[in-house]
Image (cartoon, rainbow, N blue to C red):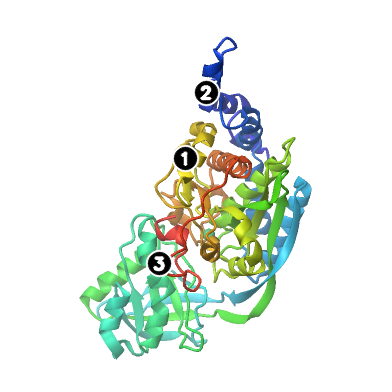
Amino acid sequence: MPAATFVLPASLALQLLSGAAPAAKPATAPAATVKAVSPAYSQAVAEKLIGPALTEGHAYARLAELTDGIGPRLSGSAGAEAAVQWALRGFKADGVKGWTEPVKVPRWVRGEERGEVLASERTRGHPLSLIALGGSAPTAPDGLTAEVVEVDSLEALAALGDSVKGKIVFFNHTMSVPADYGRFAGLRGRGPAAAAKAGAAGALVRSLATASLRTPHTGSTRFEAGGPRIPAAAVSTEDADLLHRMLARGPVRVKVVLGCSELPEVESHNVVAEVRGREKPQEIVLISAHLDSWDVGTGAHDDGAGVAMVMEAARLIAKLPQAPRRTVRVVLFMNEEHGLHGARAYAEAHAAELSRHVAAMEMDSGGFRPIGINLRAGAGGQELVRPWLPPLVALGAGTFHEREAGGADLTPMIPARVPFFGVQVDVTRYFDYHHTMADTLDKVDPQDLARSTAAVAWMTYAMAEMPGTLARPEAPATPPGPPALVPQSKASGQ
Ligand SMILES: [Zn+2]
């Protein structure tokens, strides 16, 4: 596609750049003044990374290949394996050395799914817009019919004791802004298992969404190994409101049919690639995203955009006349969405060198415009990074964002005290599309993606080139628990 038509014209990109650059030094300036404004970095390198990211449309073209060309990529599926091969081909074409590393992943497969509110003496019936949660058990072939009981928290469920036995527990909540995701994601992740333990026959969860055109949002739910498993689905926010209104007037019975199945684990792969450092190749700056997606939509924002950004950053850095001081390693994790298997496999396989991971980033909040830089490091991090921020000013990302850097796939590196950095994007619209059929390429603005890609490329280079490295953050007081159902980066709204 003529991607260049979507992005900033080269002249504007360069204007933006020169506007963002440290003041050019006049030829006649006294030596002391020259020294005072001399930037920490090479302006020429900044232009070589940011200019093409803004003007060439390469990241967007690559995202189109992944979303329109490969499509959905749920772990264990043929689409996920096609994505692995696609990424390898892409790195090869870019002149970036790439390879795969093995990961065992679950294979959950969606089947038929439908539901309805049954007619009663008070009302006629209604179809329900629903979608099975990843990890859900199937219903019997002819479906599950039961009375609905509504709760708004795990505590409210516990208070009902075994009165939910044989019923369908409906987890309702009040998510309205992205920051609510972390507050309510536990209802999706842990609610169905808690309902199953209390004897419920099924669970419905209000979609975790900030906008809806009656589109339900899927996501992972987790049952304890050996514990009871029940059918669990998300309903659209409109259907959640309908259930809530009807329940206020009296008992409601629904019928749900879910044909999903859990197949044996399969072998899959993380895709890893490297641009070797020129002075300290043993020191690693890791940039990452997750290659898998949910099985509905094409994972354009989640997380095709992140994949496109970090692949493009590596391509542009590999094209520089001189490699940065440290090694830039790209990791495209497999199965962030349904258990963080790729993240754990990477941290285990590379445990011996995590002490040499001097910085790590995961881009996994959509392909939106950049609004700042995040860090998670020991003392002095901002002071170290600040001199490298001027090229980001014109991109809208030249300041530190208050949110701590992180990413679900980075959590297994926390005990090794790996410092994290990130480009914060504007997540206002992320949860309109997240985990839905609507997460498709048309939702990604090419200019926003180009700007975030430019910021990722520059920040990656900065971390790999700056003379010093970030101090390592304190070890957490309590080690991270089992793989987060609420990814760390998403807990506060990403
Ligand atoms: Zn994601």
* Mark 3 vs 1, N-terminal side: 3
Figure check: 37 above or below 335: above
The mark closer to the camera, 3 or 2, is 2
Say which element carries label 3.
Answer: helix
Figure check: 215 above or below 148: above
Taking the spot 60% from the left edge, 12% from the top edge, the residue there is 27
Q: Quadrant of the C terminus?
A: bottom left
Instruction: Characterize the local packing of mark 2: few (<14), some (14-19) or many (20 or more) Cα atoms within 10 angstroms.
Output: few
The alpha-carbon separation of the residues under discs 1 and 2 comes to: 16 Å
Q: Identify residue for label 1.
A: 383
Q: Identify residue for label 3.
A: 185
In the depicted view, which residue is nearer to us: 77 or 212? 77
The mark closer to the camera, 3 or 1, is 1
Can residue 7 be seen from the camera position used here? yes
Query: Is residue 180 rendered to the left or right of residue 69?
Result: left
Say which element carries label 2.
Answer: helix
In the depicted view, which residue is nearer to us: 275 or 216? 275
- Across and down, in percent, residue 467 comes to 60, 40
Residue type at numbered disc 2 = Val
- Across and down, in percent, residue 181 comes to 39, 61
Residue type at numbered disc 3 = Ala
Q: Quadrant of the N terminus?
A: top right
The alpha-carbon separation of the residues under discs 3 and 2 comes to: 47 Å
* Mark 1 vs 2, N-terminal side: 2
Instruction: Characterize the local packing of mark 3: few (<14), some (14-19) or many (20 or more) Cα atoms within 10 angstroms.
Output: many
